[in-house]
Amino acid sequence: MIDAELIAAQNAQQQNALDSDYAALGERLARAGVDIESLTQQASQFAVALPSWGLGTGGTRFARFPGSGEPRNIFEKVDDCAVVNQLGQATPAVSLHIPWDTPSDAAELRQFAQERGLHFDAMNSNTFQDQKGQPQSYKYGSLSHSDKAVRDQAVEHNIEVIELGRKLGSNALTVWVGDGSNFPGQQNFNRTFSRYLDSTSAIYSALPDDWSMQLEHKMFEPAFYSTVIQDWGSSYLAATQIGERCKCLVDLGHHAPNVNIEMIVSRLAQFGKLGGFHFNDSKYGDDDLDSGSINPYQLFLVFNELVDIKNRQPSFAPFYMLDQSHNVTDPIESLIYSAAEVQRAFVKALLVDRKALEGFQDSNDVLMAQGTLKAAYNLDVEPILQMARLRSNGAIDPIQAYRASGYRAQCGKDRPASKNSSGSGIV
Ligand code: LRH
Ligand code: MN
Ligand code: MN
């Protein structure tokens, strides 16, 4: 990890400026009856999990340009996650993709992570690729395949992922399948969906009592004509049919262009079926760009709904994870930056004057209603994020501290490049 003294020295240089920015923001918020300390505390408690597959440089289906010092195995990825969390203090959990990041020894990995202040979040299964030595192929689908032998193999894989997750202390399984078709007529929509429901129900019955299962929908890719769980409608139907602890997972990049994602969030939550998120940003499709880099207002609007839901249902606790592909940036930097962007959207959403908003909504004062959201969104809450990091021994400016530490250069020496290092980054 990074030398704590280096972080402290950097913080010492920046603390005077932060103290005065924080005091000024505190005064401004106090005028509106908002306690900055309560916001800072909620910011400190905010957590978003890191994807094990996001630590290596990603790629497209055309090329991958690996950086130096990339992690070569899950232990080195966990080391990098520890650095992200040490500096940013918002990412204490890791979400594993299996078999990309299957540990040879689960107990050892759990211990290794614990020693670095990390634990394991939702487990992700993978039946969208063929693995070496696997008897059946997923070329024409997995959980919804026409051949029972293929479906059984895919169900079995998910059960193995649950078993591994139990050993790691996880409590959720996320299922995303690429199943679908490329041409009209290739598959019967009804029969394919029924087979998917049978398979996912079999997985659900192997779920430990304290686990939940998340169905992740995606409109297209790799299937380009139809996808079995293509939108929140199919996801909701499936989750409802499968069981109470089966919920829907919203990946921000998996929707039709211009879809109102925040409204989907509200609908799913209203009916108890919102299970979690994969945060990222996009301009065109499932771009997996850094969270908040393209449409930060949308991210804020999603959190505006989440805060509203939490006020109605205090036990509401969806899974939060980053799901990004870092093709041209240092993954550690992107993950630190993105976690802070998600945290920022959360803090801004806490600032929405909900009583005033409700009044404007009820009296149809349209301009003031939208202005109430904008007033929260336009406020710069950076001093709150910085203070939350400082108080948890993170870095006031985590990117600067990371660069000053020389961590990546050291990794370049300690981790000679291997051809297969890092996750695929192509999905
Ligand atoms: C599919 C997806 C899903 C996978 C991940 C690698 O596009 O979003 O979450 O598990 O990418
Ligand atoms: Mn995803
Ligand atoms: Mn995706």
Image (tube, rainbow, N blue to C red):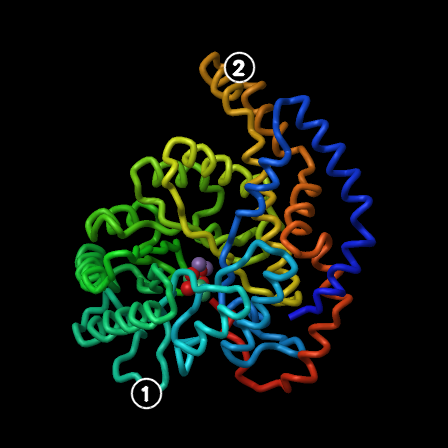
Which residue is under mark 1?
133
Crowding around mark 2 (Cα neighbors within 10 Å: few <14, some 14 to 19, many 20+) is few
Between discs 1 and 2, the one toward the N terminus:
1
Question: Looking at the image, can residue 186 be seen?
Answer: yes
- The answer to whether residue 285 is left or right of residue 16 is left
Name the amino acid, label 1: Gly
User: Closest to the observer: 206 or 156?
Assistant: 206
Q: Is mark 1 within 8 Å of ligand 1?
A: no
Residue 79 position, x and y percent, is: 57, 72
Which residue is under mark 2?
365
Alpha-carbon span between mark 1 and mark 2:
63 Å
Splitting the image into 4 quarters, where does residue 229 fall?
Answer: bottom left
| Quarter, ligand 2 | bottom left
Residue 302 position, x and y percent, is: 49, 40
User: Closest to the observer: 258 or 390?
Assistant: 390
The total number of labels drawn is: 2
Hey, which residue is sitting farthest top in the picture? Answer: 363
Crowding around mark 1 (Cα neighbors within 10 Å: few <14, some 14 to 19, many 20+) is few
Q: Give the numbered dot on residue 77.
A: none
Q: Residue at x 29, y 57 (%)?
A: 211
Q: Residue at x 48, y 14 (%)?
A: 364
Q: Residue at x 74, y 69 (%)?
A: 405
Question: Looking at the image, can residue 188 be seen?
Answer: no
Relative to 33, residue 228 above or below: below
Residue 276 position, x and y percent, is: 40, 50
**SS type, badge 2:** loop
Q: Residue at x 50, y 40 (%)?
A: 303
| Quarter of the image that includes the N terminus | bottom right
Name the amino acid, label 2: Asp
Relative to 368, residue 69 above or below: below
**SS type, badge 1:** loop
